[in-house]
Amino acid sequence: MSGIGNKFQQETKYEPNRIPRHSLVWETKPALYKEYPEAHKIELVCFEPSQPMSLDRALKQRKSIRDFEQKPISKGQLSYLLWASTGIQRIEDGYEFRTAPSAGALYPIETYVVVNDVRKLEVGVYHYCIRTHQLEQLKPGKFRQEITTAALGQGMCARAAAVFIWTAVFERCKWKYGQRAYRYIYLDAGHIAENLALAAVSINLGSCEVGALYDDQVNAILGIDGIKESVLCMAVVGATI
Ligand SMILES: Cc1cc2nc3c(=O)[nH]c(=O)nc-3n(C[C@H](O)[C@H](O)[C@H](O)COP(=O)(O)O)c2cc1C
């Protein structure tokens, strides 16, 4: 069967007589967290929804929202969405586990945010420091237009209060799973994206996932190389009309 996708699916299959076995080289295990030590850090206050919504209601209400009221979301709401999508949720035997599951607990996904309109937060590009639950400011300034252009001109990126961008640091997962890691990496991102969608509904915000994007344009906004780390998908978030 031709086509890179078909080939990938076949060549990364597990079969009873074909499970790659290699011993893990612990000395080369990639770091679990990406951090920007030089970046200006913004503390994220803890935010507890005042009227928690049941999971059943959130599941019934979730749908893709592409139009938003032109008003800011709060820093607390952004903090909650970051935590709910991928934040640290428990520590067991000294290991930090997160709100979304991850194949082998290798956590290859990084989260960035283009802030368009969040109260008490400068517009710009930020990285979410998961370990400390802080934002790291990467680039101040307006990125509404650039992120919209990078999303094939989808205007919801300009109308949204914030655009979440998920990337993968591929080696974190490839270190253990080789080429099969790509399956798990995309699945990991999907879990995080759905956490965000449900968390947004639960605090009366709307969201929509964005898979149509020019990879290298988004990578350039984030300042990542597109090889070791690359964008996978994004999601817009804002106040519902
Ligand atoms: C991986 C993925 C990528 C998507 N990319 C886009 C996109 O680029 N633009 C868009 O308008 N919607 C996008 N969507 C949203 C889908 O169009 C939407 O989920 C689908 O129509 C079902 O509608 P619902 O989410 O309201 O239930 C994407 C959804 C997923 C899961």
Image: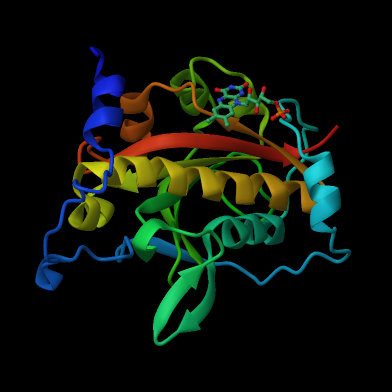
Residue at 30% of width from left, 63% of height from top? 38
Ligand 1 - quadrant of the structure image = top right
- Among all residues in the image, which is located at the extreme top? 2
- Residue in the image at 21% along x and 62% along y: 30
Q: Position of residue 26 (x, y in %)?
A: 14, 72
Q: Vertical placement of 76 versus 93: above or below?
A: above
Q: Locate residue 221: give its quadrant.
A: top left
Q: Quadrant of the N terminus?
A: top left
Q: Inspect this view and state whether residue 97 appears.
A: yes
- Residue 69: percent from the left, percent from the top? 80, 33
Q: Residue furthest right?
A: 51
Above-or-below relation of 108 to 46: above
Name the one closer to the observer, 23 or 188: 23
- The percent coordinates of residue 171 (x first, y second) are 21, 51
Give the residue drawn at x 46%, y 84%: 92
Asked if residue 101 lies left or right of residue 64, the reply is left
Q: 89 left or right of 73?
A: left
Q: Position of residue 31 (x, y in %)?
A: 25, 66
Residue 69 in the figure: left or right of residue 193: right
